[in-house]
Amino acid sequence: MSLLSRGARFVVNQWHAIDHDSAAFARKQGYDFRPLVVLVVVAVSLTIQQYIGERDTFYRWFPPGGDDYWALKSYAWWSGWRFIGYVIIPVIAIWAMPGERVRDYYASVRQFWRHLRIYLGLFILVLPLVIGASGTDAFQKTYPFYKDANRSLFDLLAWEGLYALQFVSLEFFFRGFMLRGLAGRFGSAAIFVMIVPYCMIHYGKPMPETLGAIVAGLVLGTLAMRTKSIWGGAMIHIGVALTMDFLALGHCPPGGAGPCSGH
């Protein structure tokens, strides 16, 4: 049996295990109302992100007026609305559902530490692909999103902090709130429901990255449901994102000039 076949069989076995756990939960739960709540909240949250949480809304409501940090503030707007839409709104929905607890939505740190080596292995596996892509024009024109990140240490740290916040928020929303909320009704199929909107939020990025989001969604979704923790996915996302930014900045002159200039 080839290595690829063994890998596929291993993944399918994980899905079977998820289905077994979900079926046991469904027998105890009876009618599961959570998917109705979760899918409505997902639709509302993603709509808010599109019509309020994007940077173009900030542009319309707060036009630039000679503020050197206006672009950074626009990213604070973007990251802040990700936190509101991906964390605050789902947490309110969880609190509103009888018997539900936020920590049960794969927010446990304890399970993350138990499976840390798996996520470190995945990061090492992905790293050569990121390094290989870093030399392409599309990559260098896209990253970092904040084009003044190399202007000063403050700009760099502020941007990367905002970037990390939205990744943690994203993982809670897609790999925690969605998967835990859909698991009782859909089992492992919840992963495939989740990757549809997860892939779509990558529209506008380079096509290979958007297609890669499908694979990443499958892998990270499977791991989140098996380990019952979102933090490994958050660690990989933040680690890859920081690596991509630093590799892109390596092609830019200091002070926000050249290919890194502009907003």
Image (cartoon, rainbow, N blue to C red):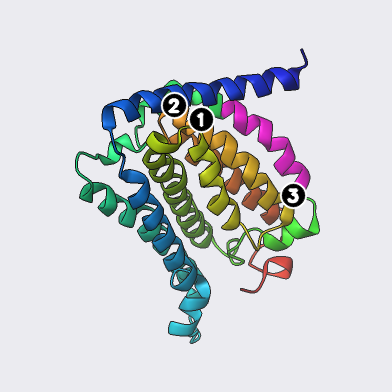
Q: Which residue is the site of mark 3?
A: 134
How many numbered marks have been drawn onto this rendered protein structure?
3
User: How far apart in space, not on screen, are marks 2 and 1 (Cα)?
Assistant: 6 Å
- Residue 125 among magenta residues: yes
Prevalent SS, magenta region: helix
Q: Nearer the viewer, residue 51 or 250?
A: 51
Mark 3 or 2 closer to N-term? 3
Tag 1 secondary structure: helix
109 with respect to 125 (left or right): left
Residue drawn where x is 48% and y is 21% of the image = 17
- Residue 61 among magenta residues: no
Quadrant containing the C terminus is bottom right
**Whole-percent x, y for residue 157 in the image:** 49, 55
Residue drawn where x is 52% and y is 45% of the image = 193
Tag 3 secondary structure: loop
User: How far apart in space, not on screen, are marks 3 and 2 (Cα)?
Assistant: 31 Å
Q: Nearer the viewer, residue 158 or 184?
A: 184
Q: Which residue is the site of mark 2?
A: 227
Between label 1 and label 3, give the one nearer the viewer.
1
Between label 3 and label 2, give the one nearer the viewer.
2
**Whole-percent x, y for residue 96 in the image:** 21, 51
Residue type, mark 1 in image: Leu
Q: Are marks 2 and 1 in contact (CB under 8 Å)?
A: yes
Quadrant containing the N terminus is top right
Q: What crowding class fits label 3: few (fewer than 14 Cα within 10 Å), some (14-19), or many (20 or more)?
A: many
Tell me which segment is drawn in magenta: 120-134
Residue type, mark 2 in image: Thr
Q: Give the vertical position of 179 relative to 260 (above or below).
A: above
Q: Which residue is the site of mark 1?
A: 223
